[in-house]
Image (spheres, grey):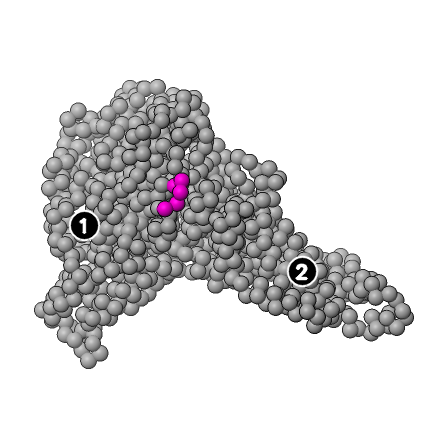
Amino acid sequence: MTKNSDRNSRGTSSLALPMPAIHRRDLLALGAGGLLAASGFRGARAQTKAAPPPPSKPTGQVVVGLSQEPTAFNPLMPGIEVDETVWMQIFNTMWLAQPDGSLVPDLAVEIPSEANGGISEGGLAWKVKLREGVTWHDGTPFTAEDVKYTLELINAPGFKARTRVGHSLVKDIKVTGPLEISWRMEKAYAPYLALLSNTFIVPKHLLEKAADPNTAPYNAAPVGTGPFKWGTRTPGDNIQLVANEKYHGKGPYLERAVLKYVPDQTALYAQFRTGQVDLIIGTGIPANFYAEAVKLPGRKVMKIPSASLEILMPNLENPVLKDKAVRKALYASINKQAIIDIIYYGLHTPTESFAPQESWAYNPGLPKQSYDLALANKILDDAGWKRSGSGTRMKDGVPLTFAVSTTTGAALREQAQQLMMQDWQQIGVKMTINNMPAAVIWGDFYTRSKFDSLLVGTAFRTVIDPDPAHRFGSDAIPAKNGNGANQMQWQNAEADALMKDGQTTFDQAKRKAIYYKLQELVREELPILPIYQYAPVEGYKEGLIGYEPNVNARQNTWNMGSWYWAK
Amino acid sequence: MSSFLLQRLMQALLLLLIVSMIGFAILHLAPGGPMSQFAAGGDMTQADLDRIAEQLGLNRPLPIQYAEWLWRMLSGDWGNSYRDQQPVLHIIASHLGATLELMLTSTLLAMLIGAWIGIIGAVKRYSLFDSIATIGTMIALSIPTFWFGLVVIYVFSVGLGWLPSGNRFTIGDGSFLNRLHHLVGPCIVLALVSTAVWSRYMRSSMLDVINQDFVRTARAKGVPERRILLTHVLRNALLPMITITGLHVPSLLSGALVTETVFTWPGMGRLFLDSISYRDYPVVMGILMFTAVMVLLGSLLADLLYGVADPRIARSGR
């Protein structure tokens, strides 16, 4: 189909940036750039010290600029991270993760634990007390029946639930009082606490009436318990939310919140400069504008922490990459600092772990990678990879060559590929580039492990829990009919045992020891080659009080109910 | 005339069927799919992905999927978007207003200015004006839209602060003046290119007529030059323009991919781009069919208007 008016197709493709192509915030950060310099985060918190008090009634509006469009409004159905920007305002979860990783009760009165008896029988029995006085936006009181309905809906056979991880273990849900609920788990599963911090509770009284909850009109005009109520939506442009004056928590202090979709990141940044959007979150401000953006008058621009990692993901069934010596040599010859400094404007932080550095489970004592071509050459020599006439090493007739794939149009990543290619050439490795559009690469090519290796931004945890079993478990390999996202096809009995222990242990100190060990094992075996942890650039207009980056939230609108303008 | 219409209609239906088959096949056979959206982040398991694909009906054989789509289409149900669950027709309708507003304004502007440049250029052929117009047209046609769009934003919004840097209107305002203000930027960008195109059409169409015998005869009879131009030349030169206008109708409704993206204009072009990158099959098919119908209607309209404007063609009865 032709679009006559814009006949310049060249334009379309180069404009497509990384933006329309990729859709996860994780991936997105790639072209956009993130940061998180070791220097620490400037920002929002410092400003609130001298902050004036919030207004007595909701006042004013905020326009949040997003480079992806929120389109899924039922928080239990398939959606991407940007959709959570809306869910967080309309709905509540039983508890919520704070920037420091702690959980704070929201719809619940306390966080269930073994200490307070909320979790018993070694993790098999759960009991939650819910908050009193919460009402849905239509005035109906919130009760334990809503929580029961939510958990049952997720497991209902015909329902298009986004994920059933953890939820599928829940059995025998019982409402033991108007605000008390209990259930049993098929097996002990510690990460469920974290999963519930991202499970938004939906109203039974509205959804049970729908003939099919998948297509209920409710999904286009949701009703929740959150600080903001659904207002209007202009598809392809914006969503307006209005203050819920009966909110049970702090705020809301803003009369209206506008979530504005600006599809081009450069255009979004221009709108931020000219003041048409009050803040940019999510994919953030492109790395190349960072230096300029921090100097903008009347704007606060900063690096913020993100749990996403940029990694080289090898396919461990690949004849070359399955050799640990090859992975070690490749890792020793990645010039991380050059990639970060030269290509990503120095924004990101090099990392050795699959866990984000803000996590309580992060092991800071892992051996540091250093860029060492001599070492890489020695590892390959020792492992029997001999240089052939062409310069490419061989072993048992197999040449040391493989492809690195990433999303077409992700300009900065494509530059990183070239840097790697040059370095690896020097150790006798022939790397080829095989890039594809987002909708292609992240399809079967990725999920069924058809790649040699991928340059990808992704995360290895369960919501905010350090458990990576669905990424690293032997039983989580989709290409081998497993149920998970272990696209590397890593199989390691020791790792399996550690992850199983981690899932069934509820004591944080004990879990910490388990995950420390797992990180050491992953660093040694290199089923992933970690490059850096993302630190995207976000910014807001001066005078906005309350914005606070939260590495444990999917989007930094997590606390929008308590935002207001200093007047 | 009615048999002509009937014949055209049958042809159109057949064409639509073929278009839908090819479109459906290409779209679904292309690697990747709507599930890739969710796979990359790593927090959905393969079981989740497989289950959702199954629930969307993506695992069934292609001919069955097509037959079902066609059947529903014929019964007036264009399906629901994978991306936001809304009915496809509803989604298209909600983006049409923005596109019409932008495209009608810029096209009218371009046609008027373009026609004026083309007429003067033809009448004063090889004059200074004509040379400047020709060079200007070539430049305008070679400027990449995305680049020009960003330049307009950079100069007039970021630099001078005269124009908003995008959007259809200020949220919470939406008055006529506010909308007009927002329309200026994208209109300049779109009109620049189309003005160049229309002026070339107009110029060559005028030149075709100007050199014909009846014009020379009129001159010989002593008809004033102004009248020759307005009644003899212009009237005939406008005939081919009707066809071009008819063929231009679909683009009025399908929008401008690049300009809409750069200027954050919530129109059809952007919807198409977003739907393609998401592999939102029902919406892409919907836009494809919608555009195909518009193309057919546009050319039919042009044929009919041509007959009205030119009695010689109407009388020949085809």
Using residue B223 as the reference point, say whether residue A201 is left or right of it: left
| Point 35% across, 46% down: residue | A294
Q: Amino acid at mark 2?
A: Gly
Name the mark on residue B114. Answer: 2
Using residue B303 as the reference point, say whether residue A533 is left or right of it: left
Image position, residue A1 (x, y; %): 54, 59
Q: Amino acid at mark 1?
A: Ser
- Quadrant housing residue B89: top right
Quick check: is A298 in the magenta stretch? yes
Image position, residue A340 (x, y; %): 26, 56
Quarter of the picture containing the C terminus of chain A is top left
| Point 14% across, 46% down: residue | A364
What chain is tagged by disc 2? B
Quick check: is B127 in the magenta stretch? no
Q: Main secondary structure of the magenta part?
A: loop
| Point 14% across, 32% down: residue | A122
| Point 61% across, 68% down: residue | B135
Q: Is residue B27 above or below residue A186?
A: below
The residue wearing badge 1 is A353
Identify the magenta region.
Answer: A295-299
